[in-house]
Amino acid sequence: MESQLQQQEYTDTQNIKVSAPGTMVTIEPNTEDKWTEVGSQVSGFLAQLPEIIGNFWESYKQPITSLGLIFAAIITVKVVLAVIDALNDIPLLAPTFELIGIAYSAWFINRYLLQASNRQELAQEIEKLKGKVVGSQQV
């Protein structure tokens, strides 16, 4: 049985080199066939790649979109915080922004919160805005 296995192993005579009688016979591996086999496997995979990606996208569209939005939100928050930090490092700019915020808050309190009629006007404006955002009220 071993002789049959050995005979089957060495039936490819293309790669056998015989230099002279009485010397050792060397068998070179057929690398050309291996490369063509690997090349055909790679080209087959690349041919099916758009279909594989399309099926994956259809299966996991919502989770991929959600993860993308989460990553975009994280990156946006980091960029905004970096810009705010850079603005705070500019001399006299941070105190100026604080003064502007205090002045706007004082104006808002004086305009909308001190009198009852103005508070009702503010409540109506908030309801209009809420209706536009939610969509229960037409523009």
Image (spheres, rainbow, N blue to C red):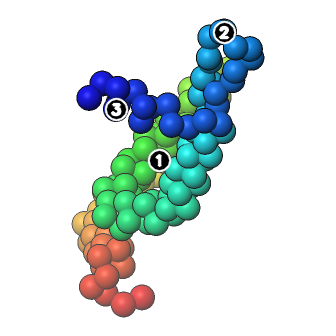
Q: Nearer the viewer, residue 75 or 92?
A: 75
Percent of width and height locating residue 130: 30, 73
Mark 2–mark 1 contact, CB under 8 Å?
Answer: no
Q: Image point 64% across, 27% down: which residue?
A: 16
What is the quadrant of residue 29 in the picture? top right
The tag earlier along the polypeptide, 2 or 1, is 2
**Is 61 left or right of 123, judged from the image as shown?**
right
Compared to residue 17, the image places residue 40 above or below, namely below
Three-letter code for the amino acid on which mark 3 is drawn? Gln
Give SS at disc 2: loop
In the picture, the disc for residue 72 is 1
Question: Where residue 80 appears, x then y in whole percent?
Answer: 53, 38
Quadrant location, the C terminus: bottom left
Q: Amino acid at mark 1?
A: Ala
Which of discs 2 and 1 lies nearer the camera? The answer is: 2
Q: Which residue is mark 3?
A: 4
How many numbered marks have been drawn onto this rendered protein structure?
3
Residue sitting at x 62%, y 18%:
26
Is residue 93 positioned above or below 74 on the image?
above
Is label 3 in a helix, a strand or a loop? helix
Callout 1: SS: helix
From where the camera sits, is residue 76 visible?
yes
| Residue under label 2 | 23
Residue 121: tell me if it is visible. no
Left or right of 130 in this view: 107: right
